[in-house]
Image (spheres, rainbow, N blue to C red):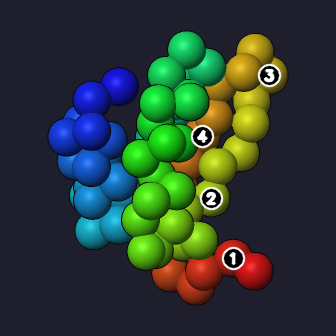
Amino acid sequence: MEKDTVKKILEQLKSGEIEEVIIKKEEFLSFREHLVKREDFKHYRGVAERGGDVTYRYLQKPRS
């Protein structure tokens, strides 16, 4: 997944433009590679789904 695409998705989650995004298992590693580099990384919560897809949401309060 392209860095610009990941950045756009993460900004949309943060702004509330979208509530959640489902990342397919094939794109997970490239998506996560860009996500963990962000300062606000702990505000994003990913929940693994059956089949390997991950649903991400933005949290106002960072997870511990």
As drawn, 45 above or below 49: below
Label 4 is placed on what type of residue? Thr
Q: Residue at x 58, y 85 (%)?
A: 61
Residue 22 can be seen, yes or no: yes
- Element marked by disc 3: loop
Q: From the image, tell me which residue sits under label 1.
A: 63
The residues tagged by marks 4 and 3 sit, at their Cα atoms, a distance apart of 11 Å
Q: Position of residue 4 (x, y in %)?
A: 19, 40
Q: Position of residue 22 (x, y in %)?
A: 51, 33
Q: Secondary structure at mark 1?
A: loop
The residue wearing badge 2 is 45
4 relative to 40 in the view: left or right: left
Is residue 58 visible to us here? no
Q: Earlier in the sequence, mark 1 or mark 3?
A: 3
Residue 30: where, in percent of width, then height? 47, 30
Hey, which quadrant is residue 45 in on the image? bottom right
Quadrant location, the N terminus: top left
Q: Which mark is residue 55?
A: 4
